[in-house]
Image (cartoon, rainbow, N blue to C red):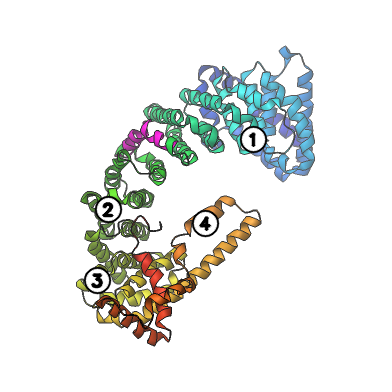
């Protein structure tokens, strides 16, 4: 095959890559359809041009020594001949084919450093001039070719960015689209970042105009890249930008029925993703963030998307709601109007999306607890949701775990204001925990965490509830917990156990069921051991993250790790700092009331069992009980 390779490339592959009469007719008659056809991923299965490009790529990879050098020489000869011809006599379709071929094999060329110099010269001499070509498809292909090599560290012409930006205003729609897609690739590098920064507003205007002309998900991706790359420049434009995105989304949704493809649906979904990126980029500017909610049709759009006919946009809609509820300070009454719609959407058509609903519900509960607890309706809606999941015999373990997360949010966020949900939550958790021996580790941990969080919320009420549900439930739950402690591997899980068990120890002065009273020493020893383990695990994670950061690791991952594990950090001491409080509980003190006397008696009994001093036990228990009795506003977020 080696002697025939040049003929294969020149006479078999290249003609398919050239711009032909059918392309020209479609370009002139329906430019939007031309763009859609070029971006149709299904073209790989029926478009001969795509097949020819794939064949060429395979040749230069698998027959590289024989084919790549020969192919590039052949292309260079034709390009040189083209440049010397009279402009009226030039073979523009073949030039298009060669440019397409060079861009198609760019992954191979970029890996071979000895090609970088000749490649830079080829682009400068034979591709850059086509930005000024009177032939529209050559201008579009020039944008595309340069975008394929945008991540190579060679000297790109200073005029290149101006050429691409100029093409954004081109009279031909495909040229504008190719320029916008090329811009996205340029933005991923750092070479043109500072040059682009002053013109962000003009770029946004050009992109919004282009999005009005054609539905294309990649255009919205470019917009999202700009928003993510230049948050400071976009922030002053956030309100008009969000308004335009909402209008673009509505426009794409209206066009869905008129299109045979899914372009409009994908473009609409990307508009929502870009809105989410916009919210994230300006969330540290409270005034701007509040204006996005108050001065744009964002909430109206989200309310419409929580209807059954918009189910295809549900995931993206929930992402936007999650951003709003996470960073709004406080969650406004207008945003609260989405809460019942959210729960109704889940009840009617969103059951399978429970894991996506949960972060939104958690934000409403924990970040706006007074509003959530102000009336019984929100709590009843959450209770109905959890009941529906637990009563569903076909519920997956993932769904059950998600419902447990909602229960935890209520216990943590509504301290002292959600007594009515304690019995049903405990009943649901213990029913699955004790009734299903085949529960996976993750579900078992979550079910036990519900019982422990109920104890942290109100230990006396939790114990009373478990006792009322039937004999043996409390000791069996304790047995299951202590027998599966190894499964509580995360720091968060250990802290849940520490708080739950500490709450039970904290009511030792009250009349307790015999099984619990006899287990206090074991529970205390378990709590102390978990405190020590969580401290050690935290130190190891911090050390590992610091080492990763020092080694040039991802700084954002480090910050996220720090944020996710800082819960209850100030209360994780090993007791040494609490030694200064020994005088508050010395052996010679005179307890003020019966509760204090019972507490000291419990300390003496457990201290004797564990062979430690009463002062040492108090030093451990006091900070733990302080954590338990913090108000909702003071408590660390989980």
In the image, 106 versus 523, the foreground residue is: 523
Q: Can residue 477 be seen by looking at this rendering?
A: yes
Distance from the alpha carbon under mark 4 to that under mark 2 = 29 Å
In three-dimensional space, the C-alpha distance between marks 4 and 1, rounded to whole angstroms, equals 44 Å
Rendered image: mark on residue 561: 4
* In front: label 1 or label 3: 3
Nearest to N terminus: mark 2 or mark 1: 1
Indicate the quadrant containing the N terminus: top left, top right, bottom left or bottom right.
top right
For mark 1, give the secondary structure.
Answer: helix
Image x and y of residue 538, in percent: 52, 65
Residue drawn at x 61%, y 38% is 188
Label whose residue precedes the other's in the sequence (2 or 3) = 2
Picture coordinates of residue 481, whole percent (x, y): 36, 74
Q: Which mark is residue 429?
A: none
Kindly report which numbered mark, 4 or 1, lies closer to the viewer in this rendering.
Answer: 4
State the separation of the CA atoms marked 2 and 3: 21 Å
Q: Earlier in the sequence, mark 4 or mark 1?
A: 1
What span is colored magenta in the figure?
288-307
Residue under circle 3? 466
Whole-percent x and y of residue 502?
36, 72
Q: Sequence order check: which comes first, mark 1 or mark 3? A: 1
Q: CA distance from mark 2 to mark 1?
A: 55 Å
Residue sitting at x 29%, y 50%: 370
Q: Which mark is residue 382?
A: 2
Residue 53 is labelled as 1
The alpha-carbon separation of the residues under discs 1 and 3 comes to 69 Å
Task: Point out the frontmost of discs 2 and 1.
Answer: 2
Question: Crowdedness of circle 4 by 10 Å Cα count: few (<14), some, many (20+)?
Answer: some
Q: Are circles 4 and 2 on residues that touch, CB within 8 Å?
A: no
Q: Secondary structure at mark 3?
A: helix
Towards the viewer: 418 or 584 = 584
Figure check: 607 above or below 576:
below
């Amino acid at each position: 095959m080696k002697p025939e390779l040049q003929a294969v490339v020149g006479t078999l592959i290249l003609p398919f890559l050239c711009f032909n009469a059918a392309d020209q007719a479609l370009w002139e008659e329906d430019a939007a359809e031309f763009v859609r056809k070029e971006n149709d991923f299904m073209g790989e299965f029926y478009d001969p041009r795509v097949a020819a490009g794939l064949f060429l790529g395979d040749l230069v990879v698998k027959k590289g020594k024989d084919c790549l050098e020969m192919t590039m020489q052949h292309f260079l000869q034709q390009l040189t001949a083209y440049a010397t011809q009279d402009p009226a006599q030039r073979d523009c379709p073949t030039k298009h084919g060669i440019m397409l071929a060079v861009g198609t094999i760019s992954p191979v060329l970029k890996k071979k450093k000895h090609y970088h110099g000749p490649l830079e010269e080829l682009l400068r001499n034979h591709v850059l001039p086509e930005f000024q070509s009177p032939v529209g498809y050559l201008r579009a292909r020039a944008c595309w070719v340069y975008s394929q090599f945008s991540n190579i560290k060679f000297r790109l012409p200073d005029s290149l960015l101006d050429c691409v930006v100029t093409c954004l205003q081109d009279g031909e729609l495909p040229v504008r689209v190719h320029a916008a897609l090329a811009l996205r690739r340029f933005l991923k590098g750092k070479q043109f970042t500072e040059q682009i920064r002053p013109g962000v507003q003009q770029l946004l205007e050009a992109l919004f105009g282009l999005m009005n002309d054609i539905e294309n998900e990649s255009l919205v991706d470019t917009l999202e890249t700009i928003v993510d790359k230049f948050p400071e420049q976009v922030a002053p434009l956030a309100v008009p930008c969000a308004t335009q995105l909402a209008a673009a989304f509505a426009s794409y949704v209206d066009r869905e029925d008129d299109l045979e493809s899914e372009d409009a649906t994908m473009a609409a979904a990307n508009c929502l993703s870009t809105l989410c990126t916009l919210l994230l980029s300006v969330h540290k500017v409270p005034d701007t963030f509040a204006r996005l909610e108050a001065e744009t049709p964002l909430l109206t759009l989200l309310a419409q998307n929580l209807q059954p006919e918009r189910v295809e946009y549900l995931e993206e809609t929930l992402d936007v709601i999650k951003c709003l509820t996470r960073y709004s300070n406080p969650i406004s009454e207008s945003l609260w109007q989405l809460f019942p719609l959210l729960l109704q959407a889940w009840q009617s058509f969103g059951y399978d999306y429970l894991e996506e609903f949960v972060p939104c519900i958690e934000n409403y509960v924990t970040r706006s607890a007074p509003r959530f607890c102000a009336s019984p309706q929100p709590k009843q809606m959450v209770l109905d949701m959890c009941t529906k999941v637990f009563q569903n015999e076909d519920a997956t373990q993932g769904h059950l775990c998600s419902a447990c997360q909602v229960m935890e949010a209520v216990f943590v966020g509504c301290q002292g204001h959600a007594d009515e949900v304690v019995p049903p939550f405990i009943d649901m958790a213990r029913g699955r925990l004790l009734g299903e021996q085949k529960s996976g580790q993750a579900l078992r941990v979550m079910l036990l965490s519900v019982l422990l969080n109920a104890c942290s919320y109100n230990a006396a009420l939790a114990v009373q509830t478990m006792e009322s549900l039937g004999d043996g439930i409390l000791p069996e739950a304790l047995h299951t917990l202590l027998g599966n402690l190894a499964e509580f591997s995360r720091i968060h899980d250990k802290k849940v156990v520490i708080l739950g068990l500490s709450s039970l120890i904290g009511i030792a002065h009250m009349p307790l069921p015999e099984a619990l009273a006899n287990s206090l020493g074991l529970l205390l020893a378990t709590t102390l051991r978990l405190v020590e383990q969580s401290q050690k695990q935290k130190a190891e994670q911090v050390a590992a993250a610091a080492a990763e950061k020092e080694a040039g690791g991802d700084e954002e991952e480090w910050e996220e790790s720090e944020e996710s594990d800082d819960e209850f950090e100030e209360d994780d001491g090993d007791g040494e700092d609490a030694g200064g409080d020994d005088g508050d509980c010395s052996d010679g003190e005179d307890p003020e009331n019966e509760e204090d006397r019972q507490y000291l008696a419990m300390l003496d009994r457990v201290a004797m069992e564990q062979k430690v001093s009463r002062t040492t036990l108090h030093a451990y228990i006091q900070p733990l009980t302080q954590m338990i009795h913090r108000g909702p506003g003071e408590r660390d977020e989980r």
